[in-house]
Amino acid sequence: MIAYIIRRILLMIPTLVAISIISFIIIQLPPGDFLTTYVAQLSASGETVDQAELEALKERFGLDEPMYMQYLKWAGNFLKGDFGHSFEWNKPVSELIGERLSLTVIISVFTILFTWAISLPIGIYSAVRQYSWMDYFLTVIGFIGLATPNFLFALVMLWVSYAYLGLSIGGLFSPEYAEAPWSIAKFLDLLKHLWIPVVIVGTAHTAKFIRIIRGNLLDELRKPYVTTARAKGLSEVHLILKYPVRVAINPLVSTIGWTLPELVSGIAITAVVLNLPTTGPLLLSALLSQDMQLAGTFIMLLSFLTVVGTLISDILLAWVDPRIRFGAREGL
Amino acid sequence: MDQKQKEMKYLNATWRQLVWWRYKKHTLAMIGLISISGMYFTAIFCEFLAPYEKDTRHLEAIYSPPSRIHIFDENGSLRWPFVRQMDMEIDLETHKMTFKEIMGKNYPIKLFVQGDPYLFWGMWETDIHFFGVETPAKLFLFGADRMGRDVFSRCLYGTRISLSIGMIGVFMSLVLGLTLGGISGYSGGWADVVIQRIIEIIRCFPSIPLWMGLSASMPPHWPALKVYFTITLILSLVGWTDLARMVRGKLIALREEEFVLAARFIGASDARIIFRHLLPSFTSHIIVSVTLAIPGMILAETALSFLGIGLRPPITSLGVLLKEAQNVTTVALYPWLLIPVAFVIIIVLSFNFVGDGLRDAVDPYSR
């Protein structure tokens, strides 16, 4: 097991390097380097440009050096936890992103838990009672859930709750807690608001998972061992939950890998609609004002997050399924 | 037709016929196919089908609600469907606009009416619209937006752009996916390793932030058409990976088959083996993957345009339309601005139905 984990971590390194290169390219894509943008912004607002400060920034990011040196310098700073400087906010990037990134993680984790909690019982029910009217009803709901993109769903929810219930469901905190330091009360307040984005982002995945579980379980239920167990008089609940379900949810564990990038994507755009204090809105505003250091850091950290998530899912999968643990190569 | 003839017909059926028979049994897939055909039909003829040009402003009808279509006149007698001329009043204190129908000013909905002039397919100048009403009455099936533009006409134009983005984007991903997946699957070796690593890395990125980063770096002064093509390019740069994986998997499974070996013994070149023998044997899978990839493209474009970093006016896609609906207080007052959402959902749902139906039809043993 340990050897497997170490091998996975080593394999991660080239991926992370490649991600950082792509992020760096995105930072460099807009014409002109960011100092020119910065100077233009300063002069536009009528402030004088401090030559010494400019020189210091040039030195810090190695702007006079060739591209690959700039990359190495940037990546080196990154490892030290210096993510660069946001010119829109005039603050170090690391100060801006910490809380937003952790809120994104919190929402992702809760969404995954929500997705599983809802889809598992419904999927089992749909498979066991195949072709019942409830199964058809859930299938239709699932299709609509799959076809409705998160942010449009959020938009419609926002409108319905505002126009008919008279309340605004945007944001993650009540106004009195928005700027407050972290405390138990603030956390409870967060939990009160959290369910809305979780439900909105989770719907599409719940629909997808229900279909996967239903399909897998239907295959499993037709196998002879189920008939044997039934013939031997095992109680129905015990029979279904103990064997076929365990086999049927196996592929779900491996889906965490691709679920995470999709979730992070979904949260990013839903957050813009619902005005959540997560990475999405700040990334968007950074991109719109060409604050590329901030934007690039976001893109890079979000991708890191998904790589780590994939690692966790692989480890989980190896833990659940011994075939992978003992060197079957397909999974890699 | 007696039993024997039926049997013969079945036995002599071509592969296409078999697929079509199986497809027809799938109710949802047929509904999807009809709805997609309808969508493409409106997209192709949208200038003619829309009662107004997409950018025509009706200043006297800003935020006008959807027109009410009557079939009974003031005396209660049945008439051809008509609308009434509207009168706008502005409350000077709140600046809220209210619309009232003027009784007695009835304008029947006519077919083939003269309206805004336009260039049909950019070639023929004409001003005939499929349906509409004569001025001063207005026909706003879905209401009007903040500039008094007809939301229904804009939805039709938006459908055209959104569908075309899906087509062009998928075509480009198909080219990329076939080439790279083909190299990776057929030749194997280090090329395979490199391409697989690239695919894995691209898939690590959460797609929307990556798309956002790429499209936001387009300079703002670019013309709308250039933005349009760049956006499709960006979408397909991320979207090709699924196709490439599918192509690679199929090639690896097929290249060891006897018929490939036989072709090689006869002395067929690699290109001939790929294009003459391998590709045709999984064209159906490619078609299915492509059908299922289109809605993803359309959604991605909608999301980007909705955020304001995708397409820009004057090019109007469904996402550009939804940008008008970003503010919840505006939407609460003028809920018809949300109607494009329904178009997006119907398009995506139909493509999914068709894709699922096709998959079952071309490969009945897959499940």
Image (cartoon, coloured by chain):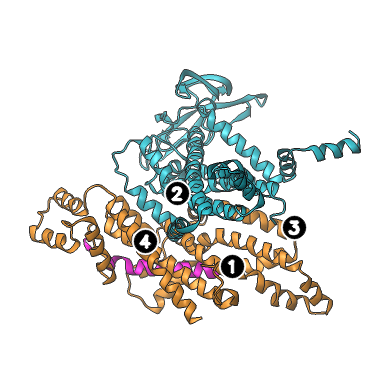
Q: Which of marks 3 and 1 is in front?
A: 1
Image height check: is B184 above or below B221? below
Q: Where is residue B129 in the image (x, y as percent from the top left)?
A: 53, 22
Residue at mark 3: A133
* Element carrying mark 1: helix
Say which amino acid is labelled 3: Trp
* Element carrying mark 4: helix
Mark 3–mark 4 Cα distance, whole angstroms, equals 50 Å
Say which amino acid is labelled 1: Leu
Q: The cyan chain is which one?
A: B
Using the image as rendered, state which of residue B172 and residue B66 is in the foreground.
B172
Mark 2–mark 1 Cα distance, whole angstroms, equals 27 Å
> Numbered disc 4: what chain?
A
Q: Where is residue A329 in the image (x, y as percent from the top left)?
A: 54, 69
* Element carrying mark 2: helix
Q: Residue at x 72, y 68 (%)?
A: A220
Say which amino acid is labelled 2: Ala
Q: Which chain is orange?
A: A
Residue at mark 4: A18
> Numbered disc 1: what chain?
A
Label of residue B266 in the image: none
Residue at mark 2: B303
Q: Confirm whether circles 2 and 1 share one chain.
A: no
Say which amino acid is labelled 4: Ala
> Numbered disc 2: what chain?
B
Using the image as rendered, state which of residue B294 and residue B101 is in the foreground.
B294
Q: Nearer the viewer, mark 4 or mark 2?
A: 4
Residue at mark 1: A252
